[in-house]
Image (spheres, grey):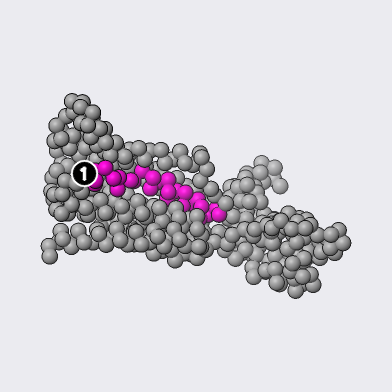
Amino acid sequence: MTFADFFHILILLGFFQGAIMSVLLFFSKKRSRPNRLLGALILLIALACLNLYLFESPWFTNNPVLNLLGNLIPLVIIMPVGPLLYFYIKSTIDPAFRITRKEKLHFLPVIIDLGTEIITVIYIAGLFLGFSMPEPSTLGLFIDDYNVYADIPRWGSITVYLWLSARYLAGVGPEKSSHSQWLHQFIRLFLVFQIIWFAYLVPYVIPSLTNKVLDAVDWYPVYIPLVVLIYCLGIKGYLMAPEELPVARKSVTPPSEEVVGEAVPLLLKAMEEDRLYLDPELNLTLLSRHTGLPQKTISLVLNQHLEKSFNEFVNGYRVEAFKQNIGQLQQDNMTILAMAFDAGFNSQATFQRAFRANTGMSPREYMTRHLEKVAKTGK
């Protein structure tokens, strides 16, 4: 077996790895929305590996029917990869994130990936309709040139969305949880691949060097790292622990005034005087034990009267505690994460999400505005 044969098989294994991980991610119950986005991203990369494998296989290229099908069925669909990785980051940080009609516009550049298929369909239709069409060899040269230069916007698209993703994570702030570390690792993995691709792309798009590059190393310097990327993204993304999701509110009968009158003072006392929210392990059971109220009563009063879930109720106090103690960040050289833990939060991701929900901005944005206000007013 030659090295080329070995790499060829490795590319095929990359496709199977990506296809399997995509299925697992699509049907995973935990963090379904982020996992589906990641699954779609990995599937697109896996299909690109399949395309290289097929067009490097004589049994495929020497068969006219299979060769035609290969030119009609788009397997290299790269333009959506950038938006998918950006939306994956956003949906992982913010469970409420949805791909709306506005977000769907990000996928319009996929038309660049479909260029060769559209050209082939137009050519075949023209032949059937009796139009005078160029020689097949001329069409083949045009498609080859198109595929070369289509890689420029593909590389640029992924690079731009990597920058947007990195900026989004920077706006959330430095995080030290395993979940946040994975997101930063996710960005770094793609960045390394982009650097490798760029080093290959520069000589590849120079007409006098294109064939020399392909003859010397083919596409393996790009696709081998791509296989590694598939493996890392798929395994790590699938194993990530699920994020804490907001408690769903059920449509039930509102509590009576008597129940509200008894429960609300006890709940407020538990938070404002006893400061139970400082306990990172606080849950409905502990709050019920402390107040003497049944868990169902607490949930009913919070959801129907105060219109908050248990997490929203408790985290609201934790956010206020963090805001009141911002001065200590400078006095005691405390980090934002340490302050969040002191306020009762047990994870950076939960803190970031709760803070943004309560204030409409990230902790770092809030802190910057607070310090600017103090500098201007002296208060």
Q: Which residue does the image show at 20% across and 27% down from the upper left?
A: 130
Q: Is residue 173 visible?
A: no
| Main SS category, magenta section | helix
Judging by the rendered image, the residue that carries numbered circle 1 is 68
x and y, in percent, of residue 298 in the image: 75, 65
| Residue pictured at 30% horizontal, 61% vertical | 16
Above or below, 108 relative to 19: above
Residue 58: image x %, image y %? 14, 53
Residue 340 image point, x, y percent: 61, 61
Which residue is pictured at 33% across the width and 38% down the height? 112
User: Does the image show residue 224?
Assistant: yes
Q: Residue at x 39, y 58 (%)?
A: 22
Q: Residues within 10 Å of mark 1 (few under 14, many from 20)?
A: few
Using the image as rendered, state which of residue 332 and residue 261 is in the foreground: 261
Residue sitting nearer the eye, 293 or 225: 293
Residue lying furthest top in this view?
132
User: For residue 93: magenta?
Assistant: yes
How many numbered discs sit on the rendered protein?
1
Residue 55 is left or right of residue 320, and the answer is: left
As for residue 363 lying within the magenta part, the answer is: no
Amino acid on which the number 1 mark rests in the picture? Leu
307 to the left or right of 119 = right
Could you tell me which secondary element the residue under label 1 belongs to? helix
User: Who is closer to the viewer here, 103 or 176?
Assistant: 103
In terms of depth relative to the viewer, which is nearer, 85 or 67?
A: 67
| Start-end of magenta stretch | 67-95
